[in-house]
């Protein structure tokens, strides 16, 4: 039974991205997150078509993303991923590469390639590392002297940037589930909200005031609240199923006492998950995103 008292309760950020933050009146929330993360004032000029935002009952299995253009003509792709994806690093690369080619007209010079930021909010253990926020950019260093390859004065003037890395896509990864401390900085205040859905009254980070005012659960209609709570329940169920099946697979492997048994047990667990998702009518792409199984293997399940 859910509490009838919803005052000062706020929707999760992924749900807000699907339903609320696409409205111009709520852009201040996104602008606040980006301003805090990129450490410069970000103003959203417009939202563009993003890759996919399914709105069916199984949208819990899918990522949610928003593609924004800021006042400087730069593109910012914000993506939330709830479920484990072992090839997520490659997907980040694919996403930015796709934008590079899509947002330049045929025949235009390469100087028209736009700057892209890829902001990834992940709720699973991506890679290995002790931090909660990671930043990646492209630099070129000499293999003999270790010097950093710089732009020429003409290039700096022409492109209006100071470093080669500013011409390339930049990546930010927020591993929000790893955050387990008191929020002391504006960025940590944002990560705390992304992890818990709570916004303390003491939070002062840009955008959180607007989130506090506009993302309240009790401001939604009864139907919207019901859909939101189903979304939360589905995420919990999915994560629990994957954890249980994988742990069961590991146990089977340990009993057999062979590394092969562990691998096979995990694969069998993933096949069970995939079969259940297939029977519910999910697409092969969605099943592959969650389980990491090959398309051919998913198609053969029955």
Image (cartoon, helix red, strand yellow):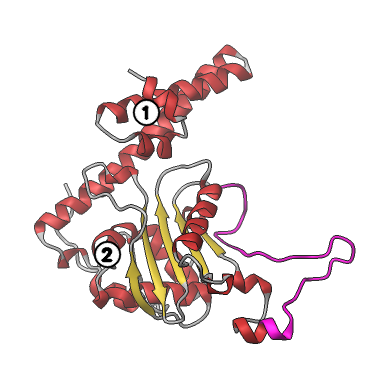
Where is 164 relative to 272, above or below? below
Which segment is the magenta one? 126-155
Query: Cα distance, mark 1 to mark 2?
Result: 32 Å
Local packing at callout 1 (Cα closer than 10 Å; few below 14, some 14-19, many 20+) is many
Q: At 55% across and 49% down in the image, what residue appears?
A: 89
Q: At 53% across and 78% down in the image, what residue appears?
A: 39
Where is 1 relative to 41, above or below? above
Give the image location of residue 136, x and y in percent: 61, 62
Q: Is residue 297 left or right of residue 277?
A: right
Q: Which residue is mark 1?
A: 274
**Quarter of the rendering occupied by the C terminus:** top left
| Mark seen at residue 10 | 2
Q: State the image quarter where residue 254 is shown.
A: top right
Give the secondary structure at mark 1.
Answer: helix
Q: Nearer the viewer, residue 4 or 119?
A: 119
Give the image location of residue 68, x and y in percent: 38, 69
Q: State yes or no: residue 179 in magenta.
A: no
Give the image location of residue 107, x and y in percent: 51, 68
Q: Nearer the viewer, mark 1 or mark 2?
A: 1
Q: Is residue 161 left or right of residue 7?
A: right
Q: Earlier in the sequence, mark 1 or mark 2?
A: 2
Find the residue positioned furthest to the left: 222
Q: State yes or no: residue 128 in magenta.
A: yes
Local packing at callout 2 (Cα closer than 10 Å; few below 14, some 14-19, many 20+) is many
Name the main secondary structure of what is drawn in magenta.
loop
Q: Is residue 295 visible?
A: yes
Find the residue positioned furthest to the right: 144
Q: At 25% across and 48% down in the image, what residue appears?
A: 231
Q: Nearer the viewer, residue 70 or 260?
A: 70
Where is 182 relative to 250, above or below? below
Q: At 25% across and 64% down in the image, what residue appears?
A: 9
Q: Is residue 235 visible?
A: no
């Amino acid at each position: 039974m859910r509490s009838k008292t919803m005052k000062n309760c706020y929707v999760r950020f992924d749900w807000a991205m699907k339903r609320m933050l696409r409205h111009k009146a709520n852009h201040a929330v996104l602008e606040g997150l980006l301003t805090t993360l990129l450490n410069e004032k970000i103003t959203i000029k417009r939202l563009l078509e993003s890759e996919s935002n399914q709105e069916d009952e199984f949208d819990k299995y899918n990522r949610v993303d928003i593609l924004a253009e800021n006042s400087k003509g730069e593109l910012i792709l914000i993506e939330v991923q709830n479920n484990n994806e072992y090839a997520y690093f490659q997907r980040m690369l694919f996403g930015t590469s796709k934008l590079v080619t899509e947002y330049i007209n045929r025949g235009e010079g390469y100087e028209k390639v736009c700057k892209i930021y890829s902001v990834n909010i992940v709720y699973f253990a991506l890679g290995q590392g002790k931090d909660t926020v990671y930043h990646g950019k492209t630099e070129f260093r000499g293999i003999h002297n270790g010097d950093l390859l710089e732009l020429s004065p003409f290039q700096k003037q022409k492109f209006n940037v100071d470093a080669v890395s500013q011409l390339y896509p930049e990546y930010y990864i927020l591993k929000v589930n790893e955050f387990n401390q008191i929020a002391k900085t504006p960025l940590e205040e944002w990560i705390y909200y992304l992890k818990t859905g709570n916004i303390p009254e003491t939070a002062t980070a840009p955008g959180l005031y607007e989130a506090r005012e506009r993302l309240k659960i009790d401001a939604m209609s009864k139907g919207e609240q019901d859909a939101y709570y189903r979304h939360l329940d589905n995420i919990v169920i999915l994560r629990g199923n994957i954890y249980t099946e994988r742990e069961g697979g590991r146990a089977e492997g340990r009993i057999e006492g062979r590394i092969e048994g562990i691998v096979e047990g995990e694969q069998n667990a993933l096949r069970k998950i995939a079969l259940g998702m297939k029977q519910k009518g999910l697409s092969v792409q969605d099943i592959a995103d969650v389980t990491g199984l090959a398309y051919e293997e998913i198609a053969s399940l029955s």
